[in-house]
Image (cartoon, rainbow, N blue to C red):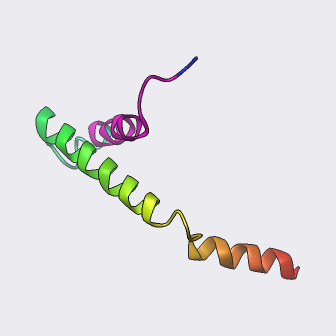
Amino acid sequence: MKSFLEKREAMAVMIIQAIICKREAIRPSPKQAAELAVEHADSLIHELNKERGEKVKYLNDWNRRRLQQ
């Protein structure tokens, strides 16, 4: 089945699910939860785009260790 959600929207949906699951710890209104989800999704996309040219440091270390074995 083809997804009609963009990457940003799909991430926001997953994040709002996590926010709703943790309602006992934080109690945002529905509007606040939606705003938090979009803010987190945008931040995650920004970081992923920034790191696109570079690998994450721990992955480099893991690959190096694997090659040495």
Please tell me which residue is depicted at 76% across the width and 79% down the height of the picture.
64
Q: Position of residue 50 (x, y in %)?
A: 43, 65
Please tell me which residue is depicted at 55% across the width and 67% down the height of the picture.
53
- The answer to whether 33 appears left or right of 10 in the picture is left
Q: Position of residue 16 (x, y in %)?
A: 30, 38
Quarter that holds the N terminus: top right
- The answer to whether 21 appears left or right of 2 in the picture is left
Q: Say if the magenta span includes residue 17.
A: yes
What's the magenta region? Answer: 3-20
Q: Main secondary structure of the magenta part?
A: helix
Q: Say if the magenta span includes residue 8.
A: yes
Q: Across the whole image, how many numbered discs are drawn on residues? A: 0
Quarter that holds the C terminus: bottom right
* Quadrant of the rendered image containing residue 59: bottom right
Q: Position of residue 34 (x, y in %)?
A: 20, 37
Q: Which residue is farthest right?
A: 69
- The answer to whether 47 appears left or right of 27 in the picture is right
Please tell me which residue is depicted at 41% across the width and 28% down the height of the picture.
5
* Quadrant of the rendered image containing residue 47: bottom left
